[in-house]
Amino acid sequence: MYRVLVFGTGKSCDLVRELLNNDVEIIGYIDNDSSKFGNIHYGKKIINPDEICGYKYDFIIIASQYNEEIYEQLMKMNIDKNIILQYYKLTDNYENYCKRLINNYLEDKYNSTEVLVTGISYAFKGFIELYCLKEAYSFAAGSQDLYYDYNIMKYLFDNHKFKMEKIKKIIIGISYYSFQYDMSLSSIKSRTLLYYEAIGKCHNFKEIEKVYEEYRINRNIADLICKKHIDGNYEFAWNIINIKSFEEKSFEEKQIIGKKQAELDCNKDYPKTVKENIQILKDYIMLLKENNINPVIVVFPASKYYYNNFSTRIENEFKNIIKNLKCEFKFQYIDYFRSNIFEDCDFEDVSHLNIKGAEKFTKILNNEIEW
């Protein structure tokens, strides 16, 4: 029987609970939110991180989107790195989605593709190839930034130009904060390893070997305490059925979540990153123009709970950049960020469309795009 402490009490905690073997005992939960100290979570006490030393445990599992901050916190507490399982670093690096997307696209069945999509999670969630007017293929992925949008396309043009000959449009899914965002400098910078292995680019991240070491540790622990399918793959629970859906949440809950998420996404002020991303988008547009492809820049819809709390500074900065780019380049720009035609039932969370909403928006793009 392995005894573990789980750091985090949100949705990620539920995902971790579903993954653990039956011979693993969660002896307590850790949280940095002082309002939760002493509360009971799934029958166990939520403790202050300072209380960790009072427990006898085999492993600590970080189950939080604030993985980097928590990991550094544990390091400062002199916790042995070899007993820390970083859940999101395990899942992020377990299967190389960038490689998979590229390899799948290179298969013969995609020889008649006319539309490609790149972008961050909003494009990944908000566009469904099946409903596109033209045959489409999406390279969008969660947390993917402009640098990798551009470099995936450049890789294909440089190494597989024959596959790009029939492409007529490329949809560039973008967010108002995209110019402020560099994945290789963010809290999920270790994810650049996937792109490094697929296209040889790690951008501003210089600790590839450290990521390999952390992944080795994560796998060693996971092999001891995590469920596996008969084929040896871990039984990751990507969705938990008993979690309340976005539509089911109360108005007050949605307001709180929307404000929190907008503040988190807008907590950015990186002039050097903005300058670099403007040039990256220019290079991206020029690459497409050189290959007679018309770019379509799309801002995907968000819920009112999110956009009503979004930073005016970042939104205005974004719109000024687009305005200046339109003076220099010809491209179509479609912006549905503040659209009121989407209802709560169209969203998976405060800022991402669900399948119903994605079908709805893909069909809107069919009419909006200048084919």
Image (cartoon, helix red, strand yellow):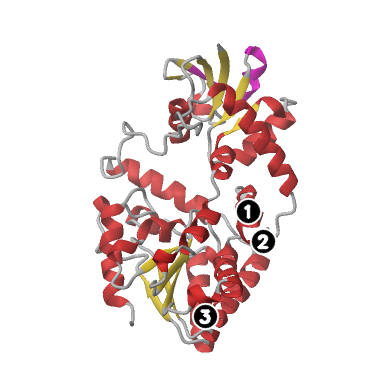
Residue depicted at x 35% and y 52%: 305
Number of numbered discs visible in the structure rendering: 3
Q: Amino acid at mark 1?
A: Thr
Q: Quick one: label 2, few (<14), some, or many (20+) residues within 10 Å? A: some
Q: Position of residue 211 (x, y in %)?
A: 69, 43
Q: Position of residue 229 (x, y in %)?
A: 45, 30
Which mark is on residue 192? 1
Please identify the quarter of the rendering in which residue 179 is found. bottom right
Which residue is the site of mark 3? 288
Q: Who comes first in sequence, dot 1 or dot 2?
A: 1
Asked which secondary structure carries label 1, the reply is: helix
Quarter of the N terminus within the rendering: top right
Q: Amino acid at mark 3?
A: Leu
Q: Are marks 1 and 2 in contact (CB under 8 Å)?
A: yes
Give the spatial CA distance, label 3 vs label 2.
Answer: 20 Å
Q: Position of residue 108 (x, y in %)?
A: 43, 65
Residue bounds of the magenta highlight? 45-56
Q: Quick one: label 3, few (<14), some, or many (20+) residues within 10 Å? A: many
The relative height of residue 223 versus residue 105 in the rendered view (above or below) is above
